[in-house]
Amino acid sequence: MSNESYHFRRKPSELMQCVPYKLKENKMKNANFSDFKLNKDLLKAIGMLNYESPTQVQAQVIPVLLAKRDVIVKSQTGSGKTAAFAIPICQMIDWEANKPQALVITPTRELAIQVKEDVFNIGRFKRLKVAAIFGKSSFYHQEKELKQKTHAVVGTPGRIIDHLERGTLDTANIKYLVLDEADEMLNMGFIDDVETIIAALPKERVTMLLSATMPADIDRLCKEHMNNPLRIEVEEKNPVAQRICQERYTVDRTEKLDLLKDILIVENPDSCIVFCNTQVAVDEVSGTLSKLKFTCMKIHGGMDQRDRMMVMNDFKKGYFRYLIATDVAARGIDIEDISLIINYDIPKDGESYVHRIGRTGRVSNTGRAVTFVTPDENAQLDAIENYTDKKIDLKGRPKKEQVNEQRAAFIEKTSTAPEIKKGKSTELDKEIMKLHINAGKKTKMRPVDIVGTLCNIDGMTADDIGIINILDVSTFVEILNNKGEMVFNVLQDMPIKGRMRTVSKADAN
């Protein structure tokens, strides 16, 4: 796409705004992913993931990346940024190549996991293999995964450098680099690590940087490591802070827990995240609510990574209603229909506030957010209101009569099992079955052995075979196009590589 297809308007001290030519509000309503001439396998996955039409950031970014041009993007949380880079990257990746072609760097493990899932789901029918590498997770298992065919890698800076130093991540064929939430990586002290990683990549590549702000170090990073990038800032018609109903309560620190209990009874949300500033506060709040029989779990940086992942997955599915969390949960969590966000502790700055409340009101939905403010936190409140350009309404504490009136409805809901939510990939999984075979690398199992066996089954072709993952003593293979049950039955009596193997159904994820 040429430069002539865009027009620009400069805004002082901000990113240059780029608006696709003639892509105004009326045109946006009629935009379709098929307009981008995407691979049929991607379009199939996009449709089954319920991406109905491109968001503004997707409509602007996708054609730029498909044209293989560097791009800097400033866009609000919940606007669909991940799909904006995942879709074109999945389109451009060459399936035949065995080494990683795309690298996405994220500031947190949670965001790395979320991005990995999104890229994997979008590339599901193209059979793209996506690896997530991050700290406090088995290096050995990550190394094993990276030794196999891998198309894209998503990771945090420290763990990426670990793999680079040990020679377990081959970056020679990286063609696409994404720096996700670059300003947060700067805030967390990762900027030097990011530059170390960039130095290990081919200079001939497409680079995309996403950042809510453009501090000097990020601006310098762009100038030094990007090639004439196009700068895009999407001004949403209904930004996060405007489409979310925001309220605040003035409360003494010693009364916060009592106020929280009253608010939860009166609001009676189907799902809620309670944000605290410290791990100690998370432990205290979750412990108190658990004793009161609230269906809640907690998540913070001091927990084991496996436990954090389990908690997040269960919350996404709706197994419990209340998640008590530090800011580790403010980024990288894309969960539909979170009814209420409560800032038990006021965030440290306006950007953190927007990321927290952005967990509700995803994309074009509305949401609710409540913030507790102690009498000595008015300066932080002013900073947040200045950042969002919106006054947060002051509310009076619920009266005892109101709390008592709502208690019966609250007890009824808490005593009823929550409705289990469908995951993003539910529709995809319907026609995909993952099979487990009790043979792997130690028995010299190879992908060609699996493909050869499956293609000898009547009605099966290579197009019906999805991702193959061979471990030391196990092999996992996805069977596409609703042929899983048939293949599973045939393999009960069919040898693989000259021997009978135990074949069972595995979890699709």
Image (spheres, helix red, strand yellow):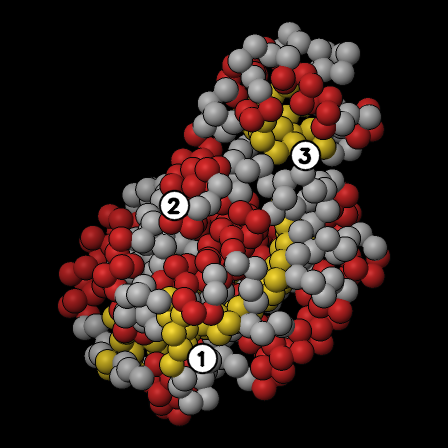
Could you tell me how far apart the alpha carbons at marks 3 and 2 are, in whole angstroms? Answer: 31 Å
Earlier residue among tags 2 and 1? 1
Instruction: Tell which residue pokes out farthest to the top in this image.
Output: 493
Task: Please report contact status of discs 2 and 1: CB closer than 8 Å, yes or no.
Answer: no
Position of the C terminus, as image quadrant, is top right
Q: Which residue type does callout 3 highlight?
A: Asn
Apparent side of residue 245 relative to residue 104 in the rendered image (left or right): left
User: In the image shown, does 306 or 283 lie closer to the viewer?
Assistant: 306
- SS for callout 3: strand
Residue 217: quadrant of the picture? bottom right
Q: Quick check: 299 above or below 355?
A: above
Residue carrying label 3: 469
Q: Which mark is residue 16?
A: 1
Mark 2 surroundings: few (<14), some (14-19) or many (≥20) residues within 10 A? few
Toward which corner of the image does residue 263 lie, by quadrant? Answer: bottom left
Where's residue 352, x and y in %? 46, 75
Residue 6 in sight from this viewpoint? yes
Indicate left or right for 331 with 469 as reference: left
